[in-house]
Image (cartoon, rainbow, N blue to C red):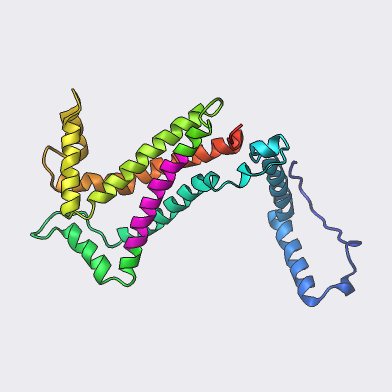
């Protein structure tokens, strides 16, 4: 549909003006005034046309595609795990952004500043304890939902042709989700975070050939300190959200194009 210039409007025959209320006449006059200048009707027609074209490409489930009477798999709760993962990710992102206004990634002081800011969020900030709890639990729910989602896809054979690429993207998202959880686990910089970080350093050093290089890159050295916390903060706040969001968009886009994989 192409956009054509339109200079005059002849709406005689649409409806008698006497049948319109003053509010309707004002609304119609405003719409015509705006349409003459911004061509609203043409663009609305384009959006309507695009909507119907997109709606025709919405993925069909296996039962819909083959007109099966048994709709059991279509409503099976395990097929909501992907959406549940995304919902938990959105909640964790919003609450994490709010926590970022008050958190300081610093190990300075006898009591680390990072730990003090976290304590202040939970004890002094209005609804701070609830905010941190929602962020923590949504992250854990996301990890569990992504893991269960991968299991469901594996056991129903959803990784097979033509969905191999989307399966690999899902595996990458699972790994990034675990990395998300690990980097966030270190940010409080308490005893649990310190020893979890130390375990991470030892695991990195155990890798042949590139172990020392990976430990220095990810943890800032062979012992924990300010460089470690700074790296975890940058990964958790500035790197992983953009990478994960982009992969989720591609993942959902492929599901949209290929349809939902149900057991045959």
> What x and y, as percent, mark residue 152?
49, 38
Quadrant where the N terminus is found in the figure:
top right
Q: Which residues are magenta?
A: 132-150
Q: Is residue 113 magenta?
A: no
Q: Is residue 121 visible?
A: yes
> What x and y, as percent, mark residue 260?
59, 38
Q: Residue at x 12, y 37 (%)?
A: 222
Q: Is residue 46 above or below residue 96?
A: above
Q: Residue at x 74, y 49 (%)?
A: 45
Q: Is residue 54 above or below residue 162?
A: below
Residue extending farthest top: 209
Residue extending farthest bottom: 22
Who is closer to the viewer here, 19 or 154? 154
Quadrant where the C terminus is found in the figure:
top right
Q: Is residue 96 visible?
A: no
Q: Quadrant of residue 132?
A: bottom left
Q: Residue at x 23, y 62 (%)?
A: 118
Q: Quadrant of residue 174?
A: top left
Who is closer to the viewer here, 47 or 97? 97
> What x and y, as percent, mark residue 6?
78, 51
Whether residue 41 sits left or right of residue 262 in the image: it is right
Q: Is residue 139 magenta?
A: yes
Whether residue 59 sits left or right of residue 185 in the image: it is right
Dominant secondary structure, magenta: helix
Whether residue 150 sits left or right of residue 109 in the image: it is right
> What x and y, as percent, mark residue 31?
73, 63
């Amino acid at each position: 549909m192409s956009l054509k210039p339109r200079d005059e409007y002849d709406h005689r025959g649409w409806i008698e003006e006497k049948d319109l209320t003053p509010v309707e006449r004002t609304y119609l006059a405003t719409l015509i005034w705006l349409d003459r200048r911004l061509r609203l009707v043409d663009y609305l027609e384009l959006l309507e046309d695009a909507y119907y074209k997109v709606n025709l490409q919405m993925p069909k489930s296996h039962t819909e595609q083959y007109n099966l009477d048994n709709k059991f798999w279509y409503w099976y709760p395990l097929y909501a795990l992907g959406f549940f993962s995304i919902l938990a990710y959105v909640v964790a992102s919003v609450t994490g952004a709010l926590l970022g206004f008050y958190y300081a990634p610093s190990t300075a002081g006898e009591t680390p500043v990072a730990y003090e800011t976290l304590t202040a969020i939970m004890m002094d900030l209005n609804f701070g304890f609830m905010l941190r709890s929602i962020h923590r639990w949504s992250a854990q729910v996301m990890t569990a939902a992504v893991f269960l989602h991968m299991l469901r896809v594996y056991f129903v054979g959803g990784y097979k042709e033509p969905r191999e690429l989307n399966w690999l993207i899902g595996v990458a998202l699972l790994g990034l989700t675990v990395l998300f959880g690990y980097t966030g686990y270190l940010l409080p910089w308490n005893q649990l975070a310190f020893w979890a970080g130390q375990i991470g350093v030892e695991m990195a050093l155990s890798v042949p050939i590139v172990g020392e290089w990976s430990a220095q890159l990810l943890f800032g050295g062979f012992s924990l300190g300010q460089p470690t916390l700074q790296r975890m903060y940058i990964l958790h706040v500035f790197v992983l959200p953009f990478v994960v969001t982009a992969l989720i968009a591609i993942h959902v886009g492929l599901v949209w194009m290929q349809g939902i994989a149900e057991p045959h």
